[in-house]
Amino acid sequence: MDLKLDADDLNQCVQCGLCLPHCPTFRVTGDESMSPRGRIALMREVQDSDAPITPEVLDSFETCVQCRGCEPACPSGVKYGHLMEQTRETLADAGEMTPLWQRLAMKPLSQPKVLRAGTAALSIANKYNLVPKRLGLPTEIDLSVEVLEASGNDVYLFTGCVMDHLQREVHEAGKLVLEAAGFGVTPTNEMAPCCGALQAHAGLVGETRQLAKTMMGNLRGDTPILVDSAGCGAAMKDYGHLLGTKEARVFSERVYDISEFLALHVGKLPEAPRLAKRVAVQDPCHLRHVQRVHEATRTVLRPFVEELVELDDDGLCCGAGGAYSVLQPKLAGQIRDRKVEAIDRVEPDLVASANPGCSMHLASAGVPTIHPMQIIWGQVSKVAR
């Protein structure tokens, strides 16, 4: 089968193995087929030698978390994330992966009214303990959430889909922090209902392209677009590659993680008392390995936290991976166990995580997680009132 992979990108991997310590699935299984170089070897066999798409081959591709922790470690600069995304797209288009139920489950993400109704049903089910605890859903989900109101037009705040319903308080905190720094904020709300990250992970890249075009059409101009979800920000910064147009590349250049943007303007934030707690920083993979702006989290937190501590696992994935913890619960749990061990070693009071999937996945294991913007607003609000 032609996986439609660029031959030069595919052959860039020299099978050196330096990626292995940075791959969460290889770390927990020791299985070469669950490593980046093993998966690339399978891609070559399928594309160049017409190897059959066996259940074992599919399992290798489907069990990749797509954390891209291998990319910074690779001396050859292999574009592993793009290779895996294209492989999944080809296999999904051919009906080899991403079954119908999974495709249907993705549909509400770009339809706010349907998603709102689904969230309400989920909330009711959660109250009656009908939702698996491993999903890490909030114990209370507000069923009557109003859209965030604009306070100006200096920046857009991307609100997206699932996060806007399950972690609206993060958007609220981010908006208030930006306003405290003097910026007028326009929440994107239904102008940009979904970034397409989860669809791309599932191989439904065609849907991601359509969502990208919709967002670009609705958010014209040069206003910065700030994102408080690391996975969404990574997807939006990749629109240039995804669509291959100058317009998309220019759009992607307007996208910032909210901490990345505030780190450039940290002096504009009001002075506030520091949080008297020990806070560990958990770097979401798409902030550290893809956007590579994770240091900004520390820049914005330091003025507001008394004791900021680092994990010693070199940014190893927590196992959330978008919908990965739902689709691959066993592996996701094993990967999370390693992250929890690293967190326990530094004995924090709180763990700051800038991605909703990570925070919910860790919270379901009893880790006290909080978004950096919530920490900052918690302190700034003491002097802003």
Image (cartoon, rainbow, N blue to C red):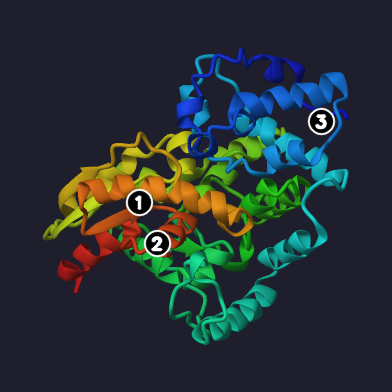
Counting from the top left corner in percent of width and height, residue 216 is at 66, 50
Q: Dividing the image into 4 quarters, which one contains the C terminus?
A: bottom left
Q: Secondary structure at mark 2?
A: loop
Which residue sits at x=59%, y=79%? Answer: 122
In the depicted view, which residue is nearer to us: 149 or 208? 208
Which residue sits at x=50%, y=15%? Answer: 75
Q: Secondary structure at mark 1?
A: helix
Q: Nearest to the eye among marks 3 and 1: give it.
A: 1
Whether pointer 2 and pointer 1 mark residues with C-beta atoms closer than 8 Å, the reply is yes
Residue at mark 2? 365
Q: How many C-alpha atoms fall within 10 Å of the one at disc 1: few (<14), some, or many (≥20)?
A: some
Mark-to-mark CA distance, 2 and 1: 8 Å
Residue 367, picture quadrant: bottom left
Q: Secondary structure at mark 3?
A: loop
Q: Nearest to the eye among marks 3 and 2: give it.
A: 2
Question: Which of the marked residues, 3 or 2, is nearer the chain's N terminus?
Answer: 3
Which residue sits at x=66%, y=32%? Answer: 82
Disc 2 marks a residue whose amino acid type is: Ala
> In the picture provided, is 383 more to the left or to the right than 91?
left
Residue at mark 3? 3
Which residue sits at x=79%, y=42%? Answer: 55
Q: How many C-alpha atoms fall within 10 Å of the one at disc 2: few (<14), some, or many (≥20)?
A: some
Counting from the top left corner in percent of width and height, residue 308 is at 19, 47
Residue at mark 1? 340
Counting from the top left corner in percent of width and height, residue 91 is at 81, 41
Question: Which of the marked residues, 3 or 1, is nearer the chain's N terminus?
Answer: 3
Disc 3 marks a residue whose amino acid type is: Leu
In the depicted view, which residue is nearer to us: 202 or 303? 202
